[in-house]
Each structure stands twice: as structure tokens, then as C-alpha cells.
Amino acid sequence: MRLYSENVRNAAMHMSEDNQQLVWFKNQAAKYQKKTKALEETLSLVNMAFLYFGPVRSIATTTMKNLKEESSEMFSEPSRDYEQKDFLKKKAKGKESNDIVSDPPTSPAVKRSGAKALA
């Protein structure tokens, strides 16, 4: 009788341990599924954003390249900088001595277009 009760008790304890492990594995599987679902949703959002902003980004990149080229062309002439510095010096001296200073120097692009430079 004692042997029978030990066998039944050992079997019941083993079943209890197995049930605890089963619950733990089920919880782990549920966590894994939640993480997988969240990652799939995030990936779909990132893909949608990439598809939407991809062309916008390329347009912005080309626009920035064009603006950079224009600004480098505009400021590539060092003589224009020296003319403007000389003009500012003359203007400062003119204010001290109350002399009238002529119009500021214009860039070659402005001279070609016939527009007047702003003071």
C-alpha cells in the first residue's frame, strides 16, 4: 500500500510540475506572438513611410543640389566680395565726413540682367 501511495504521489507531483511548465511555455509563446505582431505592424508602417517619402526625399535632394550649385556660382567670384568691402569702407568713411557715396557694386549677373542692386 505504501508503494502504491508513493507512486500516485510522485505521479501527481510530476503532473503538477508539467502543468507549471506548460503554463510558462504558453506565456512565453504569447509574448513571442505579441512581439512578432508588433514588429510586423512597425515594418508595414516603415514600408509605407518609405514608399510615400522616397520620391519626396529624391525631389528635395535634387532641389538642394541645384540650390548649392547656384549659390556656389554666385559666391565663386572673389572680386565681388572685395568690391562690396570697399563700398562699405567708403560708405563708413562717407558717414564720418558727410560725403555722398555712389551706388554699391553689383554682381556680373545683376549687371547682365539690367536690374539695379539693392542698397
Image (cartoon, rainbow, N blue to C red):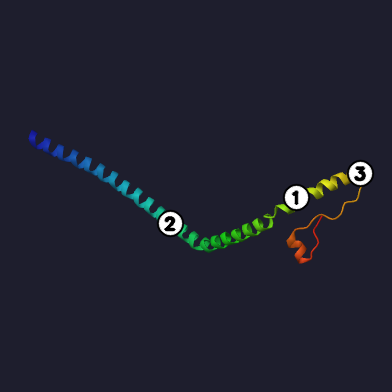
Mark 1–mark 2 contact, CB under 8 Å?
A: no
Tell me what residue is drawn at x 19 percent, y 42 percent.
15
Disc number for residue 97 = 3
Label 2 is placed on what type of residue?
Leu
As measured in the structure, the alpha-carbon distance from the residue carrying label 3 to the one carrying label 1 is 22 Å
Residue corresponding to mark 2? 43
Comes first in the chain, label 3 or label 1:
1
Is residue 81 rendered to the left or right of residue 97? left
Of all residues, the one furthest to the top in this rendering is: 2
- The x and y percentages for residue 44 are 44, 59
Where 104 sits versus 1, above or below? below
Q: Residues within 10 Å of mark 3 (few under 14, many from 20)?
A: few
Q: Height in image: 80 above or below 51? A: above
Residue type at the position of mark 3: Ser
Q: Nearer the viewer, residue 57 or 67?
A: 67
Task: Measuring from the top left, give residue 31's x and y in whole percent.
Answer: 35, 48
Label 2 and label 3: CA atoms lie apart by 71 Å
Q: Cα distance, mark 1 to mark 2?
A: 55 Å
Which residue has dot 1 on it? 82
Label 2 SS: helix
Front-most of 53 and 29?
53
